[in-house]
Amino acid sequence: MSRQELLHPDCNLLTLSDGRGGIFTWIPQEPIVEFNMLYFQPGKTRGNHFHPECHEYFLIVEGEGAMVSRDEDAENGQRLIHMSKGMCVRTPIGVTHAFYAITPVTAIALLTKKWDDCNPPIVREDLINPPS
């Protein structure tokens, strides 16, 4: 079964020791053809869908939240990954997912197929129901 996977970057230690900061590198399994910047307000959710034609990489630039995905192997049928700045998750084709912002969040969504070339780009499914 496909499921979300938390990616861990590599880092050339020389970029840390030269005093300028650091360079962290993620190598995606598939070529990236589109990326989007997303902004979230605390307590809000985006997602509740799956992508039938592309994989999605989701990189947190600022803030904290929870990525939730459907996982039949999990006890309650859902898998939760707490995410914060610098964390990246890969969501395979067909995996239902949603992101819930705990704090204000800026994220980058990277897609393996152009949104406008997908028909449909997403299929909606209830995963996280926002509070009423």
Image (cartoon, helix red, strand yellow):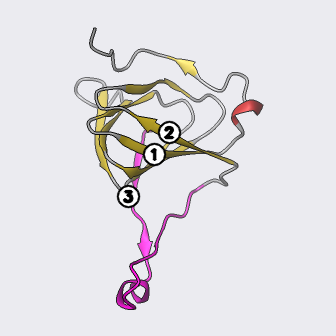
Q: Which residues are magenta?
A: 1-29
Residue 107 tag number: 1
How far across and how far down the image is residue 77, in percent? 30, 24
Residue that lies at the very extreme toward the left in this rendered image: 75
Labelled disc at residue 86? 3
Q: Amino acid at mark 3?
A: Gly
Q: Of marks 2 and 3, which one's residue comes earlier in the chain?
A: 2
First-in-chain label (1 vs 3): 3
Q: Are marks 1 and 3 in contact (CB under 8 Å)?
A: no
Which structural element holds mark 1? strand
- The verdict on residue 55 being magenta is no
Q: Which residue is mark 2?
A: 38
Q: Amino acid at mark 2?
A: Leu
Report the Cα–Cα distance between label 1 and label 3.
Answer: 10 Å
Q: In front: 113, or 71?
A: 113
Quadrant of the image occupied by residue 86: bottom left
Position above or below: 30 against 128? below
Callout 3 secondary element = loop
* Placement of 63 over or under 129, stated as above or below: below
Q: CA distance from mark 2 to mark 3?
A: 15 Å
Q: Residues within 10 Å of mark 3 (few under 14, many from 20)?
A: some
Which of the labelled discs sits on residue 39, or is there none? none
